Every structure is written in structure tokens, then in C-alpha cells.
Amino acid sequence: MAAAVKLIGLDFGTTTSSAVIAAGQLNRTATGRMELEFQEEIFRAEMVFTPMLGDERIDVDEIERLLDVWLAAGQVREGELFGGGALLTGLTAQMNNASALVSLIRRRLGDTLVATADDPCLESWLAFMGNCASLSREHPDKHILNLDIGGGTTNLALGQDRQVLRTGCLYLGARHVQVVPGSYRIVKLSSYARELFDHLGIAKGPGDELTDTEVAAVIAFYVMALEASVNSPSGSTRQIVQRLEQVPFRMPDDVRAVVVTFSGGVGELIYRHLQGEPWPTPTYYGDLGIDLAQRIVQSSIWADSLRDFRPKSAGRATVYGLLRHTTEVSGNTLFLSDPNLLPLTDMPILGNLYADSSESQIRDVLTLVRHSSRGGGVQVRLWTQQAASVRRLGQCIADVLQQSDFPATHPLVMLVRENVGRVLGQYITCWGKFPLQLLVIDEMAQRDAQYVQIGLPRDQVVPVSYYGFLPTGKLT
């Protein structure tokens, strides 16, 4: 019987914040595996300007008030949320009290969901999945490069057939130059904007009015930097672009042609215009986002992609990525030595093991777990479900744990690709004789991520979310 759950996506960006709440179901497939299925949106909040205080701090009290409104509108009851997450993106992630907002979200939504700040490769992955998953499925032979342009950053993700291959991030966005709406009078410049002004020879600051020529120079540089993500720049241009890189993006050598899509606030402006809507008046939002969107539409480099390929989510790509793609469901045969072990938050992934891993390789990985104050996760790929291979690895892990006097209270999580969780856990604990805080989760894809979050069991499965993505972003 299907179990009803709720999913949530929260995105607190440099310019705006958004929320979407949806109904989902845990369904058992014909093979017996449980899957999380998106059913329908229950609530979609209007985008609001991210509440800020005047001293580089987020207005956490105002965001808690917004959370109250959103959760009430979505009819979310305590313990009902199963999947999704919250992400602080762009320059919001660099605010002095960003950690206070993360703590608030975890307190209000529970430890089941990912809530993190300053995770640019995760944001790139989410924006691609939220914006391009369907498009990528429809064109599995195409390499798609998604540029998620917000107020503070541009998150890049290259994917093919719903698999993200590379990610990166630039400190390039609409709101580095804040102006009085309806004019080009400067209100505020980010440190990156000031450096760019120096590079361009624009000697102006708050209170000064930018000329049309100066605005054009800033926008031209932004577009050049975006184009350089496809065609590598050289000389002095490369040096300034490199200073904008939070995470360098490198196009694989074997990728010759890409379809380019856009998301984020600037992406939404682009596709609304292409659907026939008039442009808002320049600086309507108090930044250069409209100017940037207009210049992108005029660029011949993007013309074919903009004409022939239309993604779905645009301005809400990250929040839909959080809603639909953050949470995975474990296999049915997980091994859990102690129900009180869950939930687990901020669990570092410290290594990989394979069916043919040597004893010294196993010892090296488990030593890292032992020395981590939080315990640790290990990704396991056997490439087979043969009993002899499972037994050999499980017994070798058990031997190393006992030889090293591994502490019985230290969490150890095995994330296994194959459907062997329960039996591998039994071998590692010597069929219950060796006391361990052990969780073995099976049927899990391996990811280039640094952390995993594991929620409370429901219908014999647990929700699993990865974050702290590495630039390769591979999923296997």
C-alpha cells in the first residue's frame, strides 16, 4: 500500500527566496523496491525578496515568519516531511549569520532534510536537474550546459541523458551592482563588482550614476565571461574571469557541441521574453538582471539553443531540484544495528570500497572513519551479488574493525550499490556478536559528494540525501 508523504523545496538566494511544497507517495514497484514518486504541487509561494538587515546579515526572524506562512499554506504537519531540502545560495550563503538560518531550518523542518549553505556544486546539480531533467531525457544524445544565473552567482552544470558530468560556479550575477529601481544610481557594490569596476576603469561607487556606456561595459564583460564557460578565454580576460571562479568549470575535451539553457532569475526573464512577454523596465528590480537577460538574448552564440530548446523551470530550477531530486529512497534490505542511530546529519563520506579491496585499503578507509568525530560513511561497489564476494568483503571489514578496536558507539554507514545490505551488515557484525553502531543501506547510487544525510525509517526504508558535491558531479 502506498504511503503518503510531503516534500519541500526552499531556496534562499541573493535576490529572492522561494518555496514549493508537494505531495508524494512511497510506492512499491513490481520488483519490490520502494520508490518516491512526486504527485502534485500543494503550494507554491510567490517569490519574495530575501529579507536582509543592513549589516551583511540575513533577517532570520522575518524568514521564520515566512516559514510559518509557507508551512501553514502547505498544510505541513510535524513529522510529515519526508524529502526535499533547503539551500542558501549565491551571496546569501556568505552572510555573517548564514549558519543561524541553517540552524533555524533544521530546527523547524527536522534533521531528515538537507539544509546547507555555500554548496555551489550541489546548487549547480540541482539547477540542472530542476531545469533540464526532462529536456535531457528527450534529447539523450545532446550535451546540455545549464547556466543558472541568479543575483550573486552563476552555477554551471554540464549533463547528458540526465547525468551531470561537470559543475562549476562563478561569482557573476545580477545583484553585484545594486541600483535605485528605475535608474542606474548605485546603491551598493559587492567586492567582486568593485574589482570589475577597477578592471574596466569605472571610478564610481554608491551615490554615483552609471552612464549607458559603463552599464554596457559591465554587461559585455558578464556575457564574455559566460561565453568563456564554453570557449576558454585567454590573456588578461582569463585572469579576471579566474578571479570570479568559486569552483572552476572545465569543459571535457571530448565535448564538441553543447545545447545551452538558462535558469535562475535571469533565465526566467529570458524565457518569458521568448514566449512573447515584454521586458520589464530596466533596473525594475534594482539591479542589472534585465540588462543582462537582454544582452544574452541578443548574443549569436546562444541563438540556436534559445530557439530550439526550452527547459521547464527557469527561475525556480533550484527549488524544483530540491523538491524532486534531492532525496533518494534506500533499498528494502537495510541493516540497522540500533534504531536510535537515526537520523544522521552531516555524515562525512570518507572513502570507497570494492569487492577486491585489500585489507590495507579497508584499514585506511576505516581509520578515517574512526578518527572522524561524527563517524563516517563509506561507499561500496561490489559489481556482483555473489555470496562469496559479499562474505569476503564483510568478513574482511569485520576483521579490520576488531583488530583496530573500533569504538562501539561510533557511527559507521555503508552505502552499497547492490541489493545486499542486510547480509553485508550481518557479516560485518559477525551475525550480531560484534557490537557496532552500523547502518548498511543498499541500492544506493555512488556520488561525488562529501556528505550524506539519512532520515528516520518509514515503511522499512530511509530517505537519503547527498550534498557537498565535487565538481565532477558524477552519478554511477
Image: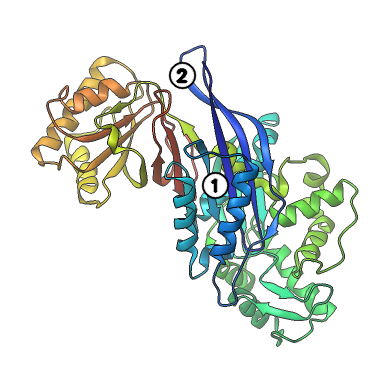
Can the viewer see residue 320 in this picture?
Answer: yes
In this view, the residue in front, 345 or 141, is 345
Q: Position of residue 378 (x, y in %)?
A: 31, 39
State left or right for residue 55 relative to residue 385. Answer: right
Task: Report crowding for label 1: few under 14, some 14 to 19, many 20 or more residues within 10 A (C-alpha).
Answer: many
Q: Secondary structure at mark 1?
A: strand
Can the viewer see residue 252 in this picture?
Answer: no
**Residue at numbered disc 1:** 166
In this view, the residue in front, 55 or 31, is 55
**Label 1 amino acid?**
Arg
Extreme residue in the top direction: 30
Q: Quadrant of residue 171?
A: bottom right
Relative to 325, does residue 271 appear above or below in the rendering?
Answer: below
Q: Quadrant of residue 280?
A: bottom right
Residue at position x 26%, y 46% from top? 375
Relative to 386, does residue 366 appear above or below in the rendering?
Answer: below
In this view, the residue in front, 312 or 284, is 284
Q: Position of residue 362 (x, y in %)?
A: 21, 38
Label located before the other in sequence (2 or 1): 2
State left or right for residue 303 relative to residue 469. Answer: right
Separation of marks 2 and 1 at Cα, in angstroms:
30 Å
Camera-near label (2 vs 1) is 2
**Residue at numbered disc 2:** 33
Relative to 412, does residue 314 appear above or below in the rendering?
Answer: below
Relative to 468, does residue 80 appear above or below in the rendering?
Answer: above
**Label 2 amino acid?**
Arg
In this view, the residue in front, 320 or 351, is 320
Q: Secondary structure at mark 2?
A: loop
